[in-house]
Amino acid sequence: YAGHSAGGLAAIIAASQDPSALGVLGLDATDTKDIPGVPDLIGQSYASNVSCPAFAIIGEPSTCNAENNGLDLFAMMDTYRAVKVVDADHCDFENPTDWICESQCENSATTYSNEEIQSVITNLGTAAVMHLTNLYADGLVTWNTNIDQLDILESLD
C-alpha cells in the first residue's frame, strides 16, 4: 500500500487491516488534524497494527503536511525506515503537481532544485517498492546507499 499525504494515512489504515500486506510506502504521509467533523489523529488507532515493513519519505515540516505528524505513525510500527528529503515541500511528492499545491505549499527557499528533490523521492520510492515486492533483491541496499551518500537526505529511524 502506498500513498501521498492523506493517501499515506489510507495506506497505513489499509495495511493495518490486511494481514497479507507486503508493505507500506508513505510519501509525506499525514494524520488527521484540525479537519472539521473528523477526529484528530485517527491514524494512531491503526498504525501499531501494521505488521509489514514500512517506508516513510517526508519533506520539511509545514502546515501542508501537518508538521510531519505522519512520521509519528511510522514510529508506532515494528519495522519501518524513514528519511527526510531536505528542502522538499508537500508538492514535491506529487508528480506532476499543480498550481493549487504550489500556491499553498511550495518551499521557495531551497538549496536543491525541484528536479533534484523529485529525483531523490522517485529513486527512494522505487527502491522501497522493489524491496517490498521482492522484485529487486537490492532494493534495500539502494535505499540505504542513497541515504548514506546523498547530502539531500536525513535518516529519521
Image (cartoon, rainbow, N blue to C red):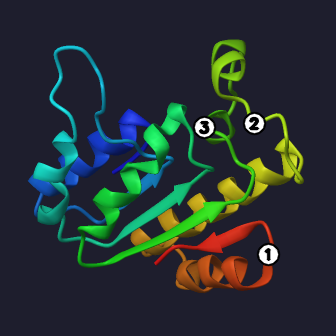
- Can residue 133 be seen here? no
Residue type of the residue flagged with mark 1: Leu
Label 2, residues with CA under 10 Å away: few <14, some 14-19, many ≥20: some
x, y percent for residue 62:
56, 39
Please tell me which residue is depicted at 15% across the width and 64% down the height of the picture: 48
C-alpha distance separating marks 1 and 2:
20 Å
Q: Is residue 97 depicted above or below 95 in this figure?
A: above
Q: Which residue is mark 3?
A: 90
N-terminal of the pair, mark 1 or mark 3, is: 3
Please tell me which residue is depicted at 71% across the width and 77% down the height of the picture: 146
Left or right: 132 with respect to 124?
left
N-terminal of the pair, mark 2 or mark 3, is: 3
- Of 46 and 72, which appears nearest the observer? 72
Residue type of the residue flagged with mark 3: His
Q: Pointers 1 and 3 in contact (CB under 8 A)?
A: no
x, y percent for residue 24:
35, 59
Q: Which mark is residue 15?
A: none
Please tell me which residue is depicted at 51% across the width and 47% down the height of the picture: 28
| Quadrant of the rendered image containing residue 123 | bottom right
Residue type of the residue flagged with mark 2: Asn
Please tell me which residue is depicted at 30% across the width and 32% down the height of the picture: 33
Q: Which residue is mark 2?
A: 107
Q: Which residue is mark 1?
A: 150
Left or right: 155 with respect to 78?
right
